[in-house]
Image (spheres, grey):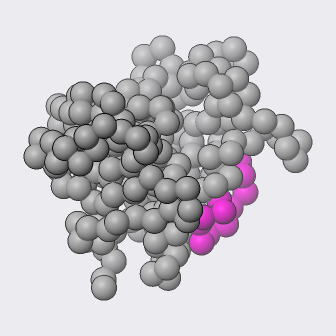
Amino acid sequence: MKEFFITGTDTDAGKTHVTSLLLKLLAQHKKQAIGFKPLAAGCEMAFDQLVNADALILMESATVSAKYDVVNPFAFAPPIAPHIAAEQVGVSITIDKLSDAYKNVKQQGANYILTEGAGGWALPINKNDYLYDWVKAEQLPVILVVGMKLGCLNHALLTAAHMQSMGINCVGWIANQVDKNMDEYQANLDSLKARLPFPILAISPYSEQTPKLQIYKSLLSALSINT
């Protein structure tokens, strides 16, 4: 089983967009893959339960189906930090509870599990722990989505430095162009290629049509896809 944690440089970096594209890439190569969105805020009532649009996108992109509660075990209505939303409704999020939920995902029979984080890398889950503590506990390889916009250099380099300090296995990063009018897009991309300590895996150009990934061999290698 191949397992990856997809994180972003900040909120709206494009984690769901990229995770969906990766799931579709795996589907093209006849891989059995499932998405996991452990924490989601900004949910709405549907089918007598709270559901999150991002989690639904992952479900639609996956080749392995599962019940909504398996894909997104912690869902909250307010569009705020999940740990604050959890406190408001008296829900406790812990590393052990996340691991128990992850075991349910592993039982769905997928060869690949792509877990999408929430917000950026340093996301609190309670008063003491962060989502990256769970990632380290599960020893998940990480893919970093860099939202290509003003400020991306600082966000990406700080995130990478923290990952290195924790001994996280970041297999690479994906550039996601969220701002189609970004000044000096190529210069920023080149700066990130030169400075980030792990390889670029793919580029997701801004598109109002069908989104696609510009894939590097490093992505295929990380996903163990033979061409």
Residue range (magenta)? 59-69
Residue 27 higher or lower than 142, as above or below: below
Q: Nearest the camera: 177 or 124?
A: 177
Q: Look at 65% across and 42% down and name the residue there.
A: 73
Residue lying at the far right of the rendered structure? 48
Residue 169: x percent and y percent? 23, 48
Verify whether residue 61 appears in magenta.
yes
Can residue 147 be seen by looking at this rendering? no
Residue lying at the far left of the rendered structure? 194
Residue 120: x percent and y percent? 41, 32
Verify whether residue 8 appears in magenta.
no
Q: Look at 30% across and 72% down and name the residue there.
A: 220
Q: Nearest the camera: 70 or 10?
A: 10
Indicate the quadrant where residue 164 lies.
top left
Residue 98 higher or lower than 209, as above or below: above
Can residue 214 be seen by looking at this rendering? yes
User: In the rendered view, does 107 fall on the left or right side of 144?
Assistant: right
Residue 119: x percent and y percent? 48, 32
Indicate the quadrant where residue 108 lies.
bottom right
Q: Look at 39% across and 47% down and name the residue there.
A: 177
Indicate the quadrant where residue 121 lies.
top left
User: In the rendered view, does 76 fall on the left or right side of 143?
Assistant: right
Q: Look at 33% across and 58% down and name the residue there.
A: 203
